[in-house]
Every structure is written in structure tokens, then in C-alpha cells.
Image (tube, rainbow, N blue to C red):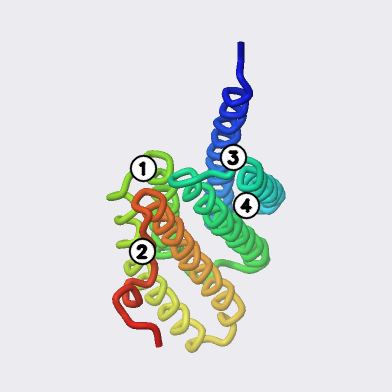
């Protein structure tokens, strides 16, 4: 005979599993969107760019479902300790993932605009920047799934390298724009792409920080503030 407590426990475990599955699903969609948007840019593929933009609708739909699921679990199950941290973390992570999807859409839109003009220069550093940002995003999600503290910490440690390469790309493009005013329109769009990738890495860092919060119960954001008195 199944008791009410057992029945409730099964529903609770089902809700938590559904939450984990949906986070993995939205993460997979975001990875696909970013990869396809960059491929569309590099290969001048308008159909792939349009396909990437459409995928954002599914990401937005999943974000809404995850938000609703978290609110329902909080209201009906009254989770405590690690489960409560997981739900709070999920709410924050899904926001970062949705914003990553938006950045992928922005890249696809710039790709469509750049298709109308000849390439400004061969893409060398921009694909490298994209690979770095995408790896940070993948590692952050893997850390969430596998519970890897060291993997999450490595994501946080790679953010400076992304910033450095972003600035290098912007400097190169600024030189080209100063040399020839005809380069300005394309140069500005490519600078935008570099900045989108830099922001993507920032969001991956946010996810890694939340993974560490989930595992340690410790907020690792803004380390300079942790030992400082309130002003």
C-alpha cells in the first residue's frame, strides 16, 4: 500500500528530475544556437543564420517552463538545504542561458547583415574567440551536470583570456576602420560580434559561480567584497 508520504516523495523526485532535464535541454539548445550562428557568420550561410534565430523561440519557451516549475516546487514542496540551493541556482542559471541565446541571435543577425557586403578581412581571431567562449559555456554546463568544482573554477579562470583576445580583435578592427572609412560599417558589426562573445563568456562565468554555490553553499561572486566591511 502506497502512503501519502511516499506518493508525495515520488512527485517531488519527479519534479526535481524534470527540472534537471529541462536545464540540460535548454543548455543544449543554447550551445547549438551559438555554434550555428558563428558557423553562419564564418561560412556566409544565411539559411543557417535564420535557423539559429528561430531556435531562440524554443529557448524562451523552456525558460518560462523552468521558471514555472521552480516556483511550483518552492510553493508546493517546501525544499530545504541542497534541494533549495539547486532550485535557486536553477532560476539564476536559466536566466544566464536565455541571455546566451539572445547573444547567439545577435550574432546571427550580424551574420545576415554582413552577407550583403564582401568580407572585411579573413576571420582568424574571431573564430578562436568563439571557440574559447563556447568551451567556457560547455564546461560550465558539464560542471553543473557532473558536479565538477575544478571544471567550474577553470571556467572562471579563463575569462581574462577571453577579455584579452576581445580587446585585440577590437584594436585590429579599429585600425582597419581608421585606414579606410569604407570599412567602418563592417568593422562596427564585427566589433559587435566580438563583444557578444565576450558577454557569452561572462554568462558562462556566472553559471560556473552558481555551480560552486550549489556545491559549496558559498557565494563566490565578487571576492573583493567577501572580506570587506559594508560601506
The residue at which mark 2 appears reads as: 220
| The quadrant where residue 118 appears | bottom right
Query: Is the residue 122 above or below the residue 22 in the image?
Result: below
The image position of residue 120, as x and y in percent, is: 53, 71
Locate residue 101 relative to residue 225 in the image: left or right: right
Q: Residue at x 55, y 67 (%)?
A: 119
The residue at which mark 3 appears reads as: 22
The residue at which mark 4 appears reads as: 45
First in sequence: mark 2 or mark 1? 1
Tell me the CA gap for discs 1 and 4.
Answer: 37 Å
First in sequence: mark 2 or mark 3? 3
Locate residue 13 relative to residue 231 in the image: left or right: right
Q: Please tell me how crowded label 2 is: few (under 14), some (14-19), or many (20+) other residues with Cα within 10 Å.
A: some
Give the structural element (helix, strand or loop) at label 3.
helix
- Which numbered tag is attached to residue 176? none
Locate residue 214 relative to residue 60 in the image: left or right: left
The image position of residue 145, as x and y in percent, is: 43, 40
The image position of residue 61, as x and y in percent, is: 71, 47
First in sequence: mark 2 or mark 4? 4
Q: Residue at x 62, y 23 (%)?
A: 7
Closest to the observer, 3 or 68? 3
Give the structural element (helix, strand or loop) at label 4.
loop
Tell me the CA gap for discs 3 and 1.
Answer: 17 Å
The residue at which mark 1 appears reads as: 147
Amino acid at each position: 500500500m502506497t502512503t501519502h508520504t511516499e506518493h508525495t516523495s515520488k512527485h517531488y523526485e519527479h519534479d526535481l528530475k524534470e527540472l534537471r532535464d529541462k536545464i540540460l535541454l535548454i543548455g543544449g539548445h543554447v550551445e547549438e544556437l551559438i555554434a550555428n550562428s558563428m558557423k553562419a557568420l564564418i561560412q556566409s550561410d544565411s539559411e543557417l543564420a535564420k535557423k539559429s534565430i528561430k531556435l531562440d523561440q524554443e529557448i524562451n519557451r523552456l525558460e518560462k517552463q523552468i521558471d514555472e516549475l521552480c516556483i511550483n516546487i518552492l510553493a508546493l514542496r517546501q525544499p530545504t538545504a541542497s534541494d533549495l540551493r539547486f532550485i535557486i541556482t536553477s532560476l539564476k542559471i536559466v536566466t544566464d542561458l536565455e541571455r546566451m541565446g539572445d547573444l547567439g541571435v545577435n550574432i546571427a543577425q550580424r551574420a545576415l547583415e554582413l552577407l550583403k557586403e564582401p568580407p572585411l578581412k579573413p576571420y582568424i581571431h574571431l573564430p578562436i574567440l568563439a571557440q574559447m567562449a563556447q568551451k567556457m559555456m560547455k564546461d560550465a554546463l558539464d560542471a553543473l551536470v557532473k558536479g565538477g568544482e575544478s571544471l567550474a573554477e577553470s571556467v572562471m579562470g579563463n575569462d581574462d583570456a577571453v577579455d584579452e583576445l576581445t580587446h585585440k580583435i577590437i584594436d585590429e578592427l579599429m585600425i582597419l576602420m581608421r585606414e579606410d572609412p569604407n570599412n567602418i560599417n563592417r568593422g562596427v558589426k564585427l566589433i559587435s560580434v566580438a563583444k557578444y562573445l565576450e558577454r557569452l563568456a561572462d554568462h558562462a562565468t556566472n553559471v560556473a559561480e552558481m555551480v560552486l554555490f550549489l556545491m559549496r553553499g558559498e557565494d563566490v561572486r565578487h571576492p573583493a567584497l567577501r572580506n570587506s566591511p559594508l560601506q
